[in-house]
Amino acid sequence: MAQRPLFSVAVAFAAGIVLSALLRAPLAVGLVVLGSACALAAARRAFTPALLILVAAAGFMRYDAHTRVPVNDLSHFLRSRVSAFEGRIISDVDIRENRALFTLAADAVEVKGRVIPVTGRVMVTHYRSPRAPDWQPPDYGEVIRIRTRLSRPSAPSNPGDFSWRDYLARRGIYTTAYIRSDKQIERLRSETPNYAVAFALRAREHLAESIGRNMPPDEASVVIGIDLGTYTVLPDRLLANFKKTGTLHLLAASGFNCAVLVVVFGFILTRIVRLPRKWINLTLIGILVFYMLMIGAKPSIVRATIMATLLLLGWIINRPSDPVNLLFAAALIILAINPADIFDIGFQLSFAAVLALIIVLPAIEAAAERWRMPATARVRANWRSRTILYLTRELWQGVACTAAATLGTLPLSAHYFNQVSIVSVAANAIVAASVLPIFAAGLLMPVLSPLPLAGDALSLVGTAVTRAAISAINWFGDMPYSCASVPSPGAVGVAGYYLVLAGLLRYAYSRIPADKKRDRAP
């Protein structure tokens, strides 16, 4: 615990959350049990376990408070004859082919002609009317009145299916509403509760529009997906092939996006603006937070933003940062804000993949060093040989990273999706090299597209690279056996897999020479 204290603290906090969710016991009962365990550990002078039990108790209380529905939440009116309700739109409006989705913070409901003040959130689905070609859903910050009934979010029809009800409940939403005609909406006024969020959403919209104007539809959908962390704009066939090839994670804004932003804007601030190092880091933190607001508070980008922020702050105060400590610090912060995120698929996959890159990747690289051919050290120093060597190293790095991330997320993918991609390593190794130019092309499109030559060149290069990536994904995805259907291993199977993997990693690290362990060990 002394070497990586946040690892133990985050695990204890998460254990308290899971314990509260599984037992569903009253808060008093849970605190009595954990308090007794803490007192017993302290009596035996086991102060570290006693402290961790207190942290688990904090996780228990936090989850209990998060999942307790307020007495004035509008979900208590589901059985009442609600004829209308009003509130403010507090989320980005997700516009899809025939509908728009947004979250509304309710202020009041109308029941039998009586207006009752309420709190709580509603997930509203606004369908496009076929008789309204100029259909325009409401926007962020608008206060609207909706004349429709409230309903409970749908539950999965089969055990193990995705639960829309649980997904919304993790975000404190227990009510849904559906609008099928523009006459059901009355726009009362427009407010801007958060100027930073409003500006970030406008920037997001401008970025997407600029990419859509300057690139073909399929290529634009991929660039928008990579830059803004969404796959809702992808065509059905392409989305299916992303899933089959195990490359869907490329459309999840994560640490890669943050790294590119830090490198690009760090270069500008260092070489062009020439700010002091302290102000460069603080500016980069502001840029990362702004990008997170553009994307939305998804677990992968929140985790990456917190880790990058802690790393930049560590450079400011000249304190070295341990990657494992940073990862679990991010987990602790996210779970303290929203403890239900521990049950979110994106949260679990994101942290499992990053932890695998930190721990599994060095073991793979160390094992590969013993198989490396001596001839690679005597390559002739001409441009062709250097180019071949560079491409080989990049391809190997892509294979190693994909293999590590796959090992880290394999049981979770099987548990939640009941399928495992057979071509994941090969597809990711080939496609990963295109992600950087695709991301950069989309990021620079609003800036360079108004310039005739620069904009045309950027659009041409971005389209060509994206088209090549799409071709590779479709080629791998259309293979007859690109993925295999597997039964869900269950919680016991997932835990058993990670125990076996931990044992294999322990053995692998024991085989690393002592002079290289300091550089290799996470």
Image (spheres, rainbow, N blue to C red):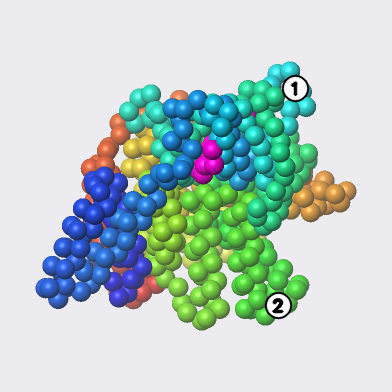
> Residue 46 appears at what percent x and percent y?
16, 73
Q: Specify the quadrant of the image occupied by residue 506.
A: bottom left
Residue that sits furthest to the right in the current view: 452
Q: Is residue 287 above or below residue 108?
A: below
> Residue 177 appears at what percent x and percent y?
54, 30
Near-viewer residue (136 or 210): 136
Kindly identify the residue that appears in the image at 53 percent across and 29 percent down.
111
Residue under label 1 = 132
Q: Is residue 13 above or below residue 6?
A: above
Q: Is residue 298 visible?
A: yes
Q: Is residue 328 left or right of residue 377?
A: left
Q: Which mark is residue 23?
A: none
**In what quadrant of the picture does the C terminus appear?**
bottom left
Residue that sits furthest to the top in the current view: 131
Tell me the distance, in whole angstroms, between the alpha carbons under discs 2 and 1. Answer: 52 Å
Residue under label 2 = 275
Q: Main secondary structure of the magenta part?
A: strand
Dot 1, how many residues are within 10 Å of its Cα: few (below 14), some (14-19), or many (20+)? few
Q: Which residues are magenta?
A: 116-128
Q: Is residue 237 visible?
A: no
Dot 2, how many residues are within 10 Å of its Cα: few (below 14), some (14-19), or many (20+)? some
Residue type at mark 1? Ala
Residue type at mark 2? Leu
- Circle 2 or circle 1, nearest the eye: 1
> Residue 99 appears at what percent x and percent y?
63, 28
Near-viewer residue (206 or 107): 107
**In what quadrant of the picture does the N terminus appear?**
bottom left
Kindly identify the residue that appears in the image at 30 percent across and 46 percent down.
21
Near-viewer residue (85 or 263): 85
Q: Is residue 64 above or below residue 154?
A: below
